[in-house]
Image: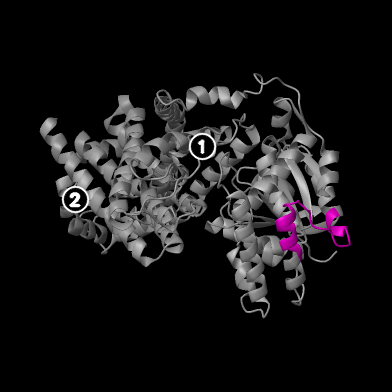
Amino acid sequence: MKSRVVALAGNPNSGKTTIFNALCGAREKVGNWPGTTVERKEGIMEYAGKKIKIVDLPGIYGLSAYSIDERIARSFLIKEKPNLVVAVVDASNLERNLYLVAQLLEMGQRVLLDLNMVDITSSRGIRIDKEKLSKILGVQVVETIASRGVGIEKLKEEIVKGLEERGKREPLKISYGSDVETAIKKLEEIIGKNKDIGMSLRGMAIKLLEGDQEFIEKFKESKYFDEIKRVMEETEKLILRKTGDDLETFMIERRYAFLKGLVKECTLRERSLEERLTLSDRIDKILTNRILGLPIFLLTVYALFQLIFYIGNPIAGLIDELFGDLATLMNTLCTKMEAPSWLSSLISDGVIPGIGSILVFLPNIALLFLGISILEDSGYLARAAFLMDRIMHALGLHGKSFIPMLIGFGCNVPAIMATRTLESRKDRILTILLNPLMSCSARLPVYTLFASAFFPERQGLIVFSLYITGIVLAIIVGRILKSIFFKEESAPLVMELPPYRLPTLRNVAMQMYLRSSLFIKKAGTVIAFTVVLIWVLSSLPPGVEYASSESFIGKFGKAISPILKPAGFGNWQSAVALSFGILAKETVVGTLGTLYGAEEESLREALKANFSPASAYAFLLMTLIYIPCIATIAAIKRETNWKWTIIAVFYSLILGWTVSVGFYQIARILW
């Protein structure tokens, strides 16, 4: 078999990426909310000795493209023409999900229909007659429960069969009524005069009547364009006169009418009306309640942070001891081996304390990722966005923008990419500018260190307050930026609420592993490099006392520390730590560990000698707000341009300094 390409297409949150991972043995991120996949991903499926290329496309509801991710999916399906399209459908929401399938079949695409999440359908007492569905649509139908790996082997088998199938498939014919059908036939005759159309004439005629600009542009240079335009305009006027609707709306309604009948014909509901009130509906009555919803969300996040410290701190203590013993052991070994003193210092004063001071927070970070994965997988994070929707709408922002911000709690880089799901460019830019205010996991080591040193009885509350501060600042800054740069009112959007699911151990464990392993890799690369760089700058010029104020790094810190003095942390070590934090936020703790030559416990004592509780919290506010890390800056540049990148860098720097100074000066008066 030649190189064949199979596309995975479907609505957002239909489980495409889970199917992709199962087919290719990949580990792409999955989430129980729309917009997890914002760019196409490729992998190889091996089955029966064959290797097949699988492309996972961003979720789309139909072939009309508005946002970037929708355009990516549509372009691939229509222009690149995969050999087979596996339409992944949420079986529990069949009517809406089949809309895209109907459009693909109208365009003459070779489709294999995957009814995913059939367990949810069964739990609701709904039985789908897949044989009848297959017969009416003229496609093979496979049932899967991707989260448990059920039906994947059958799906692989049908993919191979679908690729081996020969002959042209007739496009699906939905009746649009005599007036539109007459127009379709006329257009088929006209565009059939053009050579090398490369797709279904009926499908192309339908897209022209729907006013699809991309297809209209395709024929503008044709000598038959005036005929095409005349048919389109006459039909538009005729439908408007007869129904009062424009032609596109009329055709969408006819397509949905067909799907409604199809679903009714192919499904059997076994429960009474009262029983159809799903478990998700019942849970939502409490969790998205206008009065209770937000307090429950805040309590959930607060409880998560308490749990992180309650379980994580004892394990962190053991890791701290391990690195302390390792530094002592390496120092002893270097002495016995008569290694150069600089090498002994590099290992025992620089690399081991620096990396150790980061990895000691791995238990807390892994627990944070575990908690976020459970909330994501269950569908609760999508409810959080729904709850924030009301607040953000009141401030002129869309609740949908809150989803990328929630992703930002893990890492700002994928969160910025997730803004591709937003249709409006203005909403995208605004959300990108605000995203660095979300406390990513890289800041957690800094929060944990200072909270345990200065607020040991209220660690969870302190960290919780920083996360909330980031959200509140994002709302305020968003309002200000919107009033300056984006004064127009935005169109209303609908928030999608996926059904609640019991998180699967496999998915939750995989997400925790992937995110934690990225943190460890960062500690082994960027952070290790930074720690060595700091050690070198701390050891030069020759003869200077290590990490003293006379070293290169000390002089650099002293040069910029006066700027930070009004915020209460005008010591040069803080200035250096924050400067290196621009490379990666994790390096703030590693830098402090190297400069003070201390691991976690002794580092806390060193910090207590240089900070007060007020200046410590001001330092945390600065860490939260000031300049994003290099990777985030690069992501902002890639998704916008230099203008917005420079604005993101400078507004966050000015805001961070202002908030830190303001807090410290007020706290000095009150405390």
Distance Cα–Cα, label 1 vs label 2: 39 Å
> Residue at label 2?
564
Quadrant in which the N terminus appears: bottom right
Secondary element at tag 1: helix
Secondary element at tag 2: helix
Position of residue 101 in the picture relative to residue 563 (left or right)? right
Q: Quadrant of residue 504?
A: top right
Q: Is residue 273 magenta?
A: no
* First reached walking from the N terminus: tag 1 or tag 2: 1
Q: Quadrant of residue 305?
A: top left
The correct choice, above or below, for 310 with respect to 507 in the image is above
**Other residues around mark 2 within 10 Å, as few (<14) / some (14–19) / many (≥20):** some
Q: In the depicted view, which residue is nearer to us: 384 or 2?
A: 384
Q: Would you say residue 327 is visible in this rendering?
A: no
Report the colour scheme.
one colour
Q: Is residue 172 magenta?
A: yes
| Residue at 59% across, 27% down | 280
Instruction: Residue 253 in the image: state x and y as whole percent.
Output: 65, 47
Amino acid type of the residue tagged 1 in the rendering: Ala
Q: Which mark is residue 186?
A: none
Quadrant in which the C terminus appears: top left
**Other residues around mark 1 within 10 Å, as few (<14) / some (14–19) / many (≥20):** many
Amino acid type of the residue tagged 2 in the rendering: Leu
| Residue at 29% across, 41% down | 620
Q: Which residues are magenta?
A: 162-185
Q: Which mark is residue 382?
A: 1
Q: In the depicted view, which residue is nearer to us: 249 or 413?
A: 249
Instruction: Residue 437 in the image: state x and y as whole percent.
Output: 35, 46
